[in-house]
Image (spheres, grey):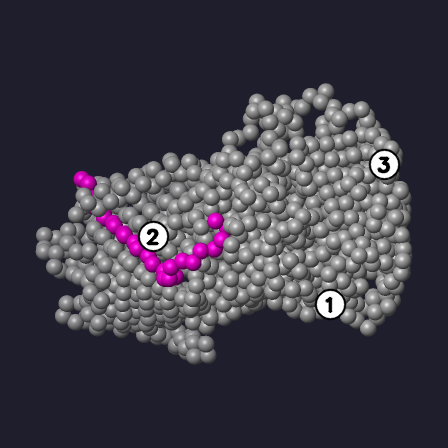
C-alpha cells in the first residue's frame, strides 16, 4: 500500500511538471456511407508511434502533444490514407474533421492492432470528460483488466462503492439497496430477490456487458427513486466481423476443496432447472417424497462453458445489421464454516449461539441475443435476455438455540435444505431516429418477467432430550414451536412493462456549425405487478407424549406415515389442519405499482467553457399492496406525486480540466416486502413489513474537479452532500418476539463526504516492428471516498405514524443519533496493471486489485443494545490473462488473497443515547457472525474461431 | 459462415422468446380465490363474501365473530358462535359474554379474540356454566386457533407503547389501576397457533393489564404454547388452571407486578411456572415482583416446577406443592442478574413440598452461595395437593 501511495504521489508530481502541450481532436466520417461516423480508424502522428483510433462516434483525440506542427495520418482498412499537417498550440485543442473515402487498393494496407470499441477505457474516459453530468462508465476492457467477472465486482471498482458480502448489496457512498436503481439499456430491471429493489449485479457476467454506467448525480431523464447511484448495464453489441468464441473455465475455492465431505440434499438437478410442487393431499397423509436428510456429493470443482457469436454486415447501401449472441453455463460450490449468534442482550449474552456449516451449489445459465439495424439515420435494436440462476444449500447449525429454553446448554441442531431459483426474461426494443438535423427521437419499450421459486425448503430442529446433556440423544419432544420443523414452498412473480420516449430539439448553431443548445421532452412509464405466494407445512410435534430419539442425519426415520398414524406429530399450515377446508390457501401478497413520469431537460452551452443542464421531472407514483398472511389480511395504498428538479453545470477550466456541479431533489420508495404483512422466517431472525411506510425525500449536491492529463489518465476530487427526510431503516420492533421491521425512523439523515480518483499511466511504450506495433504499459489507479453520516432516531415518531395507520409498531432506539446503515467512513480501491505484447498475437496482462472498506452499521440497536456492525475488510485479487495465439486466450485468477475473516458484531453502546432508556446499556462487543471465504483460484480458456 | 452465425443467433432469440412464454407453467400454482368457490379464501371475511373482491358479508350471519368491536356488544349464550378471524375489542368498545356461551374457532393464526387498550371484556361465566372458547376442528388439537389476547395500559419493563407479540396491538403505559374488564369462569382450549418460535399465541396473554381488571377462575386446556402468560402489568390472577400446555403452564415476565393464588398446573411440557424479568435486560425496571400462594404443579416438568429466568425478579411464594417433578427451581448458571437476586434473598419458597420426586431429582440446580431460599415442608398447594382442588370443580376440564 505504501508503495502504491508513493507511486501515486510521484505521478501527481510529474503531472505538475509537464511541458507546454496542446492537443488535437476531431471527427472522422465515412464518405461512402452517408457521412456516418467512422469508428476504429487509425489516427497516427507520422514518424512517431503516438496515435489513437476513432471511437464508435468517429471521434478521436490525441493529448499532450508538445507545441509544434505534425503530420497526421488517417487510415482505415479499404479506405484511402489521408495525411494532414496540423499546428499544435499551447493549451489548445486543434480540431480536424476528415471525411474518408474508399480506395481501390488492396486490403493489406493497415493492420488494426488495438480494436478500440465503445468499451475501451480511453473512449469512456473521453465521454466522461465531455459530459456535463458526473456519470462515469466502466467498459468491458477495464472490467477484464481488473478481473471483474461480473457487474457487481465491476461497480465496486468505482469510487465510493462497496459491497456487502453476505447480502450482495451494493453501497454507494454508504447508501444501500433502496437508494440505487439498476437498469438495462436505460429500461428498468426487476430484482431477483423479493426483499430487494436492485437485481444482484453478480448475475451479469461481463461477457454480456458492453459497459456499466454509474451516475452518482441525478438527471431528470431517469426515474427519481434515487439517492445513491443509477447503475445502467449496457448490453453488449457486436460491430466487428464474424466472431465465434468458445470458452471453458474451471476453478476451486480452498475452503471448499479442503472439506473432505461435501453435502447437499435431495431434489435439485445439476443444471439448476428444477421445481417441485407439494404433493396432493399433503395434510391427510405423509405424502412428501423428498428426503429430509443431507446427501454427500461429488468433488466441489467449479466449471463453466460459454459460446459467443457475433456478426455485422450490410444490406444494400444504407442498412447495416449487427448481431450478437451469447450462451453460457457456470456452476460453483462454496462452503462456509463459522460462528453465528443472535439475540445478544444488554448484558452481552447471546440468546442463540451456533457453529454453522453452509454448503452451497450455484448455477447460472445465460442466454442473450441482440439484433441491431441501422438504416440511414434510424437505429432499431432488440435485446433479449434469459437468465436462470439457482442456489442449492445445505445449512447446518449446532449449539444453543435459546439460552433459556431449547437446547439451553447446547446440542441443538437446526438444518435447512434450500433450493432457490430465479428466472428472468427480458425483451427490449429500442429506437433512435434523427429527423433532420434538429430533431432526435429516442424510444424504448421493455417487458420483464421474473420468477423466484423456493420449492420444498425443509427445516429440521432437534434438541437434546435432557438439556443438561448436550451430547446426549436428541429428540423433537421439547422443540418449542410447530414452525421449527417445516416444508416451505414459495413463488414470486413480477411482470413489468416499461416505456420511454424522448424528443430532443437542437437549436442555436455556433460558428463551428455545432448546436449550442438542446431541449428534451420525455415520458417514462413503468407498470409492475407483483405476486408472492407461500405455503408452509408445519410439522407439529406433540410434546406431552413420549417421543423417540432421532438421529439428526436420519430424520426420514421419524417424519413418515407410521409416526403420523401413531399420532407423534401432525401436519398443518398457518391456517389449520386437514379439518379446515381452506387450510391449503397460500399466504400471499400482491400489488401493482404504476409510475408515470414526464420531464423537460434543457442543455445550453453559455460560453465555450460553460455548459448548463437543467431539468424538471414530475412523477405520479401509485403502489398498491394487498395481503393475506399468517399475520392478517389487508391492503395499503401509497399514492404520491413528486416534483423533481435537477441541475448540472460544467465549467471547463482548461482543455484538460473540468469543474462540475450538480444538485437535485429525489425520493426513495419503500419496497414491497417492507410494506407487506408477511412473516419472513430466517433461522435466527424473523421479519415482517410495515404498511405505514412512505417515501423519503432526498436532496443531493455534488461538486467535482476533473483533470485529464492524458487520454488514459484522470485525476479528480469531489465533495458531496445528502439530506434525507424521513429515512427508512430496519429495526427490531419492541415486543416479546423481537422481530425486525421497517419504519421512517427519524426526521432526517445526512451524509457528507469527499472522493478522489487517480488513474495514471506509469509507462506506455510502443515498438514498431516490421509488421506490427508492440505495446507495453504499466498503469495504476486509486480511488478513495471518506464520508461522515448521521441520522436522528425517533421512536415516538414511528409509534405515532404506525398507530395512525392502524398498524402500531413500537420502536425504542438505543441511540438518539447514529450513522447511516451501510455507510463506511472510508472506502478505497487500488489497482496496478502491466501489459506486454510479445508479438502480434501474443501478449500478457497482469493486474493486482485491492479494495478496503471500514466498519459500517449493519442494523440499528434498540432498547439499550448496540448497533450491529460489519467489520471492515481489505481484499486483494490477482488476475492474469494471456493471449497465446491468434485463437487462444488463457486466464488465471487468484482472488481473496488476504482471506480476511468476515465478521459482524453487536457493539458496546457509546454515543448519543436515548434519554428514556434508564435501565442500562450494552457494555461489551459480542461477535455475532464470523467466517472465512477462502482463496478462489480460477483457470479459463477461450478459443476464437 | 455468415448464415451459420445468423442461425445461432436466431436460435438464441427463439429460445428466449419461448422461455418467456413457457415460464409461468411451473411453481406451486394454487387456484385463485373466487367469490363462488364455496370456501373462505383470498381475503374474504366469510365464505365467498367480504374482502376486496366479493360482495360484503350479509349481517344475518350473526354467529360469525370477526372484525372490530367499537360499541357495547353483548353475546347470546344460546347462539353457537364461530370465530373465523381476528375479533378485536377496540378502545371504547366492550364485549360481554354471558355464562354458558361457547365459541368455536377455526383459522389458525388468523383466529383470535383481542382487547385493545381502552377496550373492555366482560366474561361472566359461573362455576356451573363457564364461558368456553375452543377449536372448531373435527379433531381438535393444540394450535388450532390463536387465543385470548388482552392489552392494557399498565407498566411493563419493555417500555411504553410496546407491540404485542401477536394481534398487532400496542400496550404498556403508566396506569397502574387500568381496567380491561372482568374475566371469571373462562376455559380456553386448543389455543397456541404458531407463527414462529418467538411468535405464538398463548391460551390467554395479558399484556400490560392493570389491577382494575378482574382475572379469576380461568383455565387453559391443551394450549400449544404457554397456558396463561402475564407480560408486565399489575393485574392479579387467582384460581387459575393450566392443563396440557405445549410449553410452560403459567408464565409471567417483563415486570409483572401482580399477585396470584390457587394455581393448579398439570401435564405441561416445560416449566410449571416460568417467572422472568426481561429477556433483553435482566435489570430492566420495574422488576417483576409477585407474591404467590397455594400452588400445585403436577409433573413431569422438563424445566423445573419453577423456572427463575432472565433475571427472575422478587418472588415470595408460599404453599408450593409439587408432584412427580425432577427439579424444583431452575436457574441458568449464566444468568448473573438472577443470581444477584437470589443472593439478596429476593426469591423465597416456603414451604415447598416434593411428592414422588422422579429420577435425578434436585431441589434446585442453582449453585450459588445462598442455598436457603427454598424451605421444604408439607403443603396442600392449590387445595388438594396433586388432586383436583374443590374450587376447580364444575367449570374445568381434563383435570
Q: Specify which label sits upstream in the sequence, 1 or 3.
A: 1
Whether residues under marks 1 and 3 lie with C-beta atoms below 8 angstroms apart, the answer is no
* Residue at image location 59% in from the left, 32% down from the top: A582
Q: Are marks 1 and 2 on the same chain?
A: no
Q: Classify residue A780 by image quadrant.
A: bottom left
Left or right of A623 in this view: A817: right
Quick one: SS at disc 1?
loop
Along the line of sight, the residue nearer the viewer: A112 or B256: B256
Q: Nearer the viewer, mark 1 or mark 3?
A: 3
Disc 2: which residue: A329
Dot 3 crowding, Cα within 10 Å, few <14, some 14–19, many 20+: few
Q: Classify residue A151 by image quadrant.
A: bottom left
**A261 relative to B258, above or below:** below
Dot 1 crowding, Cα within 10 Å, few <14, some 14–19, many 20+: few
**B27 relative to B173, above or below:** above
Residue A399 locus on image (x, y percent): 60, 63
* Residue at image location 30% in from the left, 50% down from the top: A326
Give the residues in magenta.
A291-316
Quick one: SS at disc 3?
loop
**Inter-mark Cα distance, 1 to 2:** 54 Å
Magenta segment main secondary structure: strand
Residue B279 locus on image (x, y percent): 73, 58
* Residue at image location 12% in from the left, 56% down from the top: A107
In magenta segment, residue B128: no
Quick one: SS at disc 2?
strand
Left or right of A888 in this view: B388: right
Q: Classify residue A498 by image quadrant.
A: top left
Label ID, residue B394? 3
Dot 2 crowding, Cα within 10 Å, few <14, some 14–19, many 20+: some
Chain of residue at mark 3: B
Left or right of A682 in this view: A203: left
Label ID, residue B333? 1
Amino acid at each position: 500500500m505504501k508503495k502504491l501511495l508513493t507511486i501515486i504521489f510521484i505521478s501527481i508530481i510529474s503531472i505538475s511538471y509537464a511541458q507546454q502541450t496542446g492537443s488535437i481532436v476531431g471527427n472522422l466520417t465515412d464518405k461512402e456511407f452517408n457521412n456516418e461516423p467512422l469508428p476504429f480508424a487509425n489516427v497516427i502522428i507520422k514518424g512517431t508511434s503516438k496515435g489513437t483510433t476513432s471511437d464508435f462516434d468517429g471521434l478521436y483525440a490525441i493529448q499532450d502533444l508538445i507545441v509544434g506542427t505534425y503530420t497526421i495520418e488517417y487510415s482505415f482498412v479499404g479506405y484511402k490514407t489521408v495525411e494532414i499537417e496540423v499546428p499544435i498550440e499551447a493549451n489548445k485543442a486543434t480540431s480536424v474533421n476528415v471525411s474518408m473515402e474508399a480506395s481501390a487498393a488492396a486490403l493489406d494496407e493497415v493492420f488494426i492492432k488495438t480494436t478500440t470499441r465503445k468499451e475501451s477505457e480511453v473512449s469512456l474516459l473521453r465521454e466522461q470528460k465531455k459530459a456535463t453530468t458526473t456519470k462515469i462508465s466502466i467498459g468491458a476492457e477495464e472490467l477484464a483488466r481488473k478481473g471483474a467477472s461480473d457487474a457487481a465486482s465491476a461497480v465496486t471498482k468505482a469510487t465510493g462503492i462497496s459491497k456487502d458480502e453476505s447480502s450482495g448489496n451494493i453501497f454507494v457512498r454508504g447508501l444501500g439497496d433502496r437508494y440505487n436503481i439498476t437498469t438495462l439499456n436505460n429500461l428498468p430491471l426487476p430484482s431477483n430477490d423479493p426483499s430487494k429493489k436492485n437485481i444482484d449485479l453478480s448475475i451479469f457476467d461481463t461477457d454480456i456487458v458492453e459497459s456499466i454506467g454509474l451516475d452518482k448525480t441525478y438527471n431528470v431523464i431517469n426515474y427519481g427513486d434515487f439517492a445513491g447511484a443509477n447503475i445502467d448495464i449496457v448490453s453488449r453489441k457486436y460491430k466487428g466481423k464474424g466472431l465465434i468464441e468458445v470458452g471453458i473455465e474451471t476453478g476451486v475455492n480452498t475452503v471448499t476443496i479442503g472439506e473432505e465431505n461435501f453435502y447437499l440434499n435431495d431434489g435439485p438437478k445439476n443444471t439448476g432447472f428444477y421445481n417441485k410442487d407439494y404433493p396432493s393431499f399433503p395434510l391427510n397423509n405423509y405424502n412428501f417424497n423428498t428426503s429430509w436428510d443431507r446427501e454427500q456429493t461429488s468433488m466441489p470443482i467449479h466449471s463453466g462453458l460459454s459460446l459467443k457469436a457475433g456478426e455485422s454486415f450490410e444490406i444494400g447501401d444504407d442498412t447495416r445489421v449487427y448481431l450478437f449472441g451469447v450462451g453460457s453455463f457456470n456452476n460453483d460450490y462454496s462452503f462456509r464454516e463459522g460462528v453465528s449468534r443472535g439475540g445478544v442482550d444488554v448484558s452481552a449474552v447471546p440468546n442463540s449461539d451456533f457453529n454453522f456449516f453452509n454448503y452451497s451449489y450455484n448455477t447460472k445459465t445465460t442466454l442473450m441475443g441482440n439484433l441491431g439495424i441501422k438504416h440511414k439515420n434510424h437505429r432499431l435494436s432488440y435485446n433479449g435476455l434469459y437468465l436462470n440462476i439457482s442456489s442449492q444449500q445445505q445449512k447446518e447449525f449446532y449449539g444453543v438455540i435459546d439460552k433459556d429454553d431449547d437446547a439451553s446448554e447446547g446440542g441443538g441442531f437446526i438444518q435447512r435444505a434450500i433450493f432457490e431459483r430465479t428466472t428472468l426474461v427480458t425483451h427490449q426494443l429500442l429506437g433512435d431516429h434523427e429527423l433532420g438535423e434538429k430533431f432526435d427521437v429516442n424510444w424504448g419499450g421493455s417487458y420483464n418477467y421474473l420468477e423466484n421459486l423456493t420449492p420444498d425448503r425443509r427445516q429440521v430442529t432437534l434438541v437434546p432430550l435432557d438439556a443438561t446433556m448436550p451430547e446426549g440423544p436428541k429428540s423433537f419432544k421439547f422443540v418449542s414451536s410447530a414452525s421449527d420443523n417445516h416444508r416451505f414452498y414459495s413463488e414470486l412473480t413480477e411482470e413489468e412493462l416499461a416505456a420511454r420516449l424522448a424528443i430532443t430539439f437542437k437549436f442555436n448553431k455556433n460558428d463551428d456549425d455545432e448546436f449550442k443548445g438542446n431541449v428534451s421532452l420525455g415520458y417514462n412509464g413503468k407498470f409492475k405487478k407483483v405476486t408472492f405466494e407461500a405455503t408452509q407445512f408445519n410439522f407439529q410435534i406433540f410434546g406431552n407424549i413420549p417421543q423417540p430419539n432421532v438421529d439428526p442425519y436420519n430424520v426420514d426415520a421419524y417424519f413418515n406415515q407410521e409416526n403420523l398414524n401413531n399420532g407423534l406429530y401432525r401436519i398443518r399450515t398457518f391456517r389449520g389442519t386437514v379439518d379446515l377446508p381452506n387450510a391449503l390457501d397460500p399466504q400471499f401478497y400482491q400489488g401493482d405499482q404504476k409510475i408515470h413520469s414526464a420531464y423537460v431537460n434543457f442543455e445550453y452551452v453559455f460560453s465555450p467553457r460553460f455548459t448548463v443542464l437543467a431539468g424538471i421531472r414530475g412523477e405520479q407514483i401509485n403502489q398498491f399492496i394487498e395481503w393475506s398472511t399468517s399475520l392478517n389480511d389487508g391492503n395499503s395504498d401509497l399514492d404520491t406525486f413528486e416534483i423533481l428538479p435537477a441541475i448540472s453545470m460544467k465549467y471547463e477550466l482548461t482543455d484538460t480540466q473540468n469543474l462540475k456541479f450538480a444538485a437535485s431533489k429525489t425520493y426513495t420508495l419503500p419496497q414491497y416486502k417492507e410494506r407487506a404483512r408477511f412473516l419472513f422466517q430466517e433461522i435466527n431472525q424473523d421479519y415482517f413489513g410495515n404498511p405505514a411506510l412512505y417515501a423519503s425525500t432526498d436532496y443531493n449536491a455534488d461538486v467535482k474537479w476533473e483533470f485529464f492529463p492524458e487520454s488514459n489518465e484522470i485525476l479528480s476530487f469531489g465533495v458531496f452532500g445528502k439530506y434525507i427526510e424521513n429515512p427508512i431503516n430496519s429495526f427490531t420492533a419492541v415486543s416479546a418476539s423481537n422481530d425486525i421491521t421497517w419504519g421512517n425512523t427519524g426526521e432526517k439523515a445526512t451524509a457528507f463526504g469527499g472522493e478522489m480518483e487517480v488513474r495514471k499511466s506509469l509507462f506506455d511504450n510502443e515498438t514498431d516492428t516490421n509488421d506490427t506495433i508492440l505495446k507495453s504499459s504499466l498503469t495504476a489507479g486509486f480511488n478513495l471516498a471518506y464520508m461522515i453520516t448521521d441520522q436522528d432516531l425517533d421512536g415516538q415518531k414511528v409509534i405515532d405514524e404506525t398507530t395512525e395507520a392502524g398498524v402500531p409498531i413500537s420502536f425504542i432506539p438505543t441511540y438518539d443519533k447514529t450513522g447511516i446503515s451501510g455507510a463506511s467512513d472510508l472506502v478505497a480501491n487500488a489497482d496496478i496493471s502491466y501489459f506486454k505484447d510479445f508479438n502480434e498475437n501474443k501478449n500478457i496482462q497482469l493486474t493486482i486489485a485491492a479494495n478496503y472498506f471500514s466498519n459500517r452499521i449493519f442494523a440499528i440497536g434498540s432498547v439499550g443494545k448496540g448497533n450491529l456492525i460489519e467489520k471492515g475488510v481489505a481484499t486483494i485479487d490477482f488476475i492474469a490473462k494471456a493471449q497465446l495465439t491468434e485463437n487462444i486466450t488463457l486466464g488465471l485468477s487468484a482472488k481473496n488473497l488476504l482471506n480476511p475473516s468476515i465478521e459482524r458484531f453487536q457493539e458496546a453502546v457509546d454515543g448519543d443515547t436515548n434519554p428514556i432508556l434508564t435501565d442500562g446499556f450494552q457494555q461489551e462487543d459480542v461477535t455475532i457472525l464470523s467466517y472465512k471465504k477462502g482463496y478462489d483460484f480460477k483457470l479459463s480458456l477461450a478459443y476464437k474461431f | 459462415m455468415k448464415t451459420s452465425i445468423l442461425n445461432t443467433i436466431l436460435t438464441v432469440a427463439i429460445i428466449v422468446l419461448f422461455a418467456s412464454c413457457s415460464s409461468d407453467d411451473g411453481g406451486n400454482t394454487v387456484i385463485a380465490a373466487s367469490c363462488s368457490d364455496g370456501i373462505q379464501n383470498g381475503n374474504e371475511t366469510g365464505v365467498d363474501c367480504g374482502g376486496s373482491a366479493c360482495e360484503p358479508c350479509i349481517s344475518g350471519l350473526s354467529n360469525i365473530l370477526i372484525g372490530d368491536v367499537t360499541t357495547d356488544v353483548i353475546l347470546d349464550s344460546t347462539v353457537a358462535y364461530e370465530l373465523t378471524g381476528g375479533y378485536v375489542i377496540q378502545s371504547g368498545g366492550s364485549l360481554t359474554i354471558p355464562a354458558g356461551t361457547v365459541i368455536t374457532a377455526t383459522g389458525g393464526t388468523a383466529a383470535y379474540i383481542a382487547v385493545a387498550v381502552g377496550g373492555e371484556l366482560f366474561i361472566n361465566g359461573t362455576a356451573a356454566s363457564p364461558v368456553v372458547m375452543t377449536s372448531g376442528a373435527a379433531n381438535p388439537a393444540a394450535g388450532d386457533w390463536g387465543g385470548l389476547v388482552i392489552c392494557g395500559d399498565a407498566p411493563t419493563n419493555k417500555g411504553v407503547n410496546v407491540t404485542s407479540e401477536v394481534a398487532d396491538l400496542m400496550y404498556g403505559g403508566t396506569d397502574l389501576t387500568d381496567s380491561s374488564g372482568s374475566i371469571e369462569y373462562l376455559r380456553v382450549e386448543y389455543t397456541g397457533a404458531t407463527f414462529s418460535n418467538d411468535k405464538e399465541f398463548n391460551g390467554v396473554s395479558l399484556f400490560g393489564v392493570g389491577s382494575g381488571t378482574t382475572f379469576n377462575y380461568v383455565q387453559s386446556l391443551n394450549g400449544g404454547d404457554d397456558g396463561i402468560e402475564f407480560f408486565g402489568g399489575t393485574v392479579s390472577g387467582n384460581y387459575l388452571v393450566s392443563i396440557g400446555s405445549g410449553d410452560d403452564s403459567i408464565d409471567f415476565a417483563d415486570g409483572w407486578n401482580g399477585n396470584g393464588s390457587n394455581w393448579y398446573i398439570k401435564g405441561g411440557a416445560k416449566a410449571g411456572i416460568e417467572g422472568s424479568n426481561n429477556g433483553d435486560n435482566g435489570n430492566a425496571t420495574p422488576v417483576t415482583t409477585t407474591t404467590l400462594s397455594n400452588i400445585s404443579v403436577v409433573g413431569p416438568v422438563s424445566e423445573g416446577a419453577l423456572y427463575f429466568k432472565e433475571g427472575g425478579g422478587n418472588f415470595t411464594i408460599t404453599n408450593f406443592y409439587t408432584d412427580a417433578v425432577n427439579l424444583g427451581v431452575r436457574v441458568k448458571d449464566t444468568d448473573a442478574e438472577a443470581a444477584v437476586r437470589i443472593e439478596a434473598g429476593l426469591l423465597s419458597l416456603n414451604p415447598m413440598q416434593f411428592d414422588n420426586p422422579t429420577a435425578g431429582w434436585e431441589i434446585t440446580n442453582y449453585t450459588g452461595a445462598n442455598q436457603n431460599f427454598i424451605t421444604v415442608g408439607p403443603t396442600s398447594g392449590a387445595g388438594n395437593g396433586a388432586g383436583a382442588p374443590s374450587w376447580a370443580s364444575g367449570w374445568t376440564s381434563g383435570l
